[in-house]
Image (cartoon, helix red, strand yellow):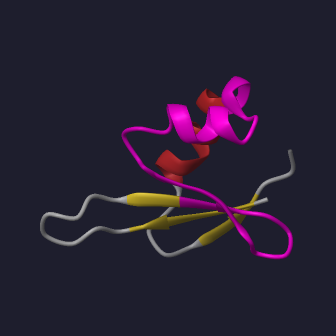
Amino acid sequence: MYIIKVKGAAKIPDYVQLRDEKFTLLAYFRVDRPDKSLEKIGLGDKTEWIMDKIKDLPFGQILKLEI
């Protein structure tokens, strides 16, 4: 799975994209509201761990996660 942190502009908030190995979009959520999106794809129990990775990730960089 891959994480991409996208910087918002003006009134558009920062977002996170979660993508699979084929780079298909699995989830797209605001940085401050990950709960429902992660629950929906079955990663609700890993929310805190994923958000820790996102917090340190620079905008526009891709991070590969082994889940």
At x 72%, y 42%, the residue is: 41
At x 28%, y 68%, the residue is: 8
Q: Where residue 46 sits in the image (x, y, percent)?
A: 71, 30
Q: Is residue 62 above or below residue 36?
A: below
Q: Is residue 2 magenta?
A: no
Q: Is residue 38 above or below residue 11?
A: above
Name the residue furthest left. 10
State left or right for residue 8 relative to residue 43: left
Residue 18 position by quadrant: bottom right
Name the residue furthest top. 45
State left or right for residue 47 relative to residue 24: left
Q: Is residue 38 magenta?
A: yes
State left or right for residue 60 relative to residue 11: right
Name the residue furthest front. 40
Q: Which residues are magenta?
A: 17-46
Q: Where residue 52 sits in the image (x, y, percent)?
A: 56, 38
